[in-house]
Amino acid sequence: MSADSFDYDVLYIGSGHGTFDGAIPLSASGLRVAVVEEEKIGGTCPNWGCNAKIILDQPIALKRHLEAVHGIVNGDVSIDWSENMANKHAIIDGLPNFIQGLMDNSKIDVLFGHAMLADKHTVTIDGQTKTADKIVIATGLRPKHLMVPGTEFAHDSKDFLALETLPERITIVGGGYIALEFATIANTAGAKVDLLLHGDQALRSFPQKYVEQILADLAERGVNIKRNVTVTALEQNGTETIVHTSAGESVADWVLDATGRVPNVENIGLDTVGVAYNAKGIVVDDHLRTSVPNIYASGDVIDKAQPNLTPTAIFESKYLMQTFTGATTAPINYPVIPTVVFTSPRIAQVGVSLATALANPTEYTVEEHAITEDWFRQIARPQFGSTSLIYNKAHQLVGAVDMSEDAAEVINTLLPAVEFQYSQDQLARLVYLFPSIGFSSNQLI
């Protein structure tokens, strides 16, 4: 069948960054495009993910900073949680309509409802049938839930980001990004926090010597961290929730289940049409094609080595746009993708990991710099923090880790050197504003 015989050239299932960043210019190029969404336009990140989190975190970071410079700036500062949440709503509540407006202006058909694949070219949306030459699955991830009795008494990250009142006592189960970030937010905002780690480590993909400093700081600030804990059950007792574990009980007013996220691959017809998937997501080739050649996947729902982050999904969405318009026939070529944990201080990294570098001393060299040795970094009076730079044999920067309140900016500054493997002569031609984090970071290389 020719493409003209279908309702659309491309139909996307899901409306997050794995879709709209590429779908909008794709439709503007003249192709007929539809997007199906059963919740809010924009998906997780704008509505109950990154955007909401960073809005709630900014007063937290400010309070931490004011504590660090106490004596220079005096006075008690507290977080008004209700006002913090109201500010979040004021900023993000209009994003779905804004994003839909961009799609409407690009003449994308936005269809609301639950999409099911009926065959390789057909999707049913709450009983309505639509056909497309190509289909892109961009259904993302959802929170994982503890498989224990009473799991219904726990809440997920979406619930936390919508809390109108901050509970006095919060128990957080997990040791990943969400667990550590929300523990930081809740603790600084005034809640008593229990953090239950299933194993001995948190943030396992980050250098543990840095992570341990973050954990020690949280513990000093009152977070009760328990390691090697197995949750066996949750029990509701009046307004309290009792978390039964292998190490005793944790009693809370509110429990956050931050034990991970799983791909949305169920109940969308993948088995019906033969799209291969596993526990990590949909299997794709180097052109983001699934096992059914005209069906593609984009964003967090993909089983991939790259981190499940908004910039990754944007890159994939734009790559598919280029593929569908014929701008490229090449396989996807991922750049180095940085990642950051918004604890306080933050931890950010990019490129070759510190663990890999230390395990292969004949291939890499590592230089570590304490941020307290840099006069400009001392302005914020950090208690601790470091930058580790990883070089290959040619002394090109191939990886970096930073632990500081400015970690995201430090890694963003170093990112071009890692991606394009600048020589020392090329680096010397980068003249940054002075004084600035960019200047200080570049001076380290």
Image (tube, grey):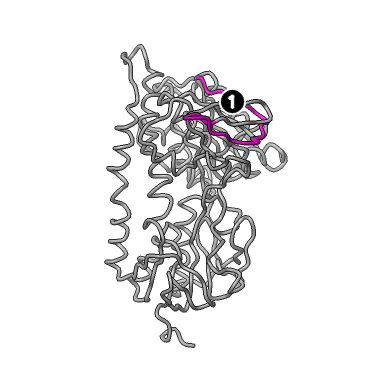
Residue 129 shows in the view: yes
Camera-nearest residue between 81 and 8: 81
Decide: is 90 above or below 242: below
Magenta span: predominant SS is strand
Magenta-colored span: 222-241
Q: In the image as oriented, which residue stretches furthest toward the top?
A: 71
Secondary structure under tag 1 reads strand
Viewer-nearest residue: 17 or 354 = 17
Q: Quadrant location of residue 350?
A: top right
Q: Position of residue 176 (x, y in %)?
A: 57, 39
Residue pictured at 61% horizontal, 26% vertical? 249
Where residue 14 appears, as percent x and y from the top left, is 44, 62
Q: Identify the residue shown where x is 38% and y is 38%.
A: 432
At 69% from the left edge and 43% from the top edge, which residue is drawn?
363
Question: What is the crowding at mark 1: few (fewer than 14 residues within 10 Å), some, or many (at least 20)?
Answer: some
Above or below, comparing residue 433 to residue 264 in the picture: above
Q: Amino acid at mark 1?
A: Ile
240 up-or-down from 72: above or below: below
In-front residue for pair 187/373:
187
Magenta segment includes 240: yes
Q: Nearer the viewer, residue 353 or 178?
A: 178
Magenta span includes 398: no
Query: Is residue 404 visible from the viewing direction of this image?
Result: no
Q: Position of residue 295 (x, y in %)?
A: 53, 72
Residue 286, quarter of picture = bottom right
Which residue, as the protein is rendered here, is positioned at the far front?
A: 238
In the image, is 389 to the left or to the right of 134?
Answer: right
- The quarter of the picture where residue 54 lies is top left
Percent position of residue 107, x then y:
30, 71
Please give the residue where the numbered disc 1 appears in the rendered image: 225
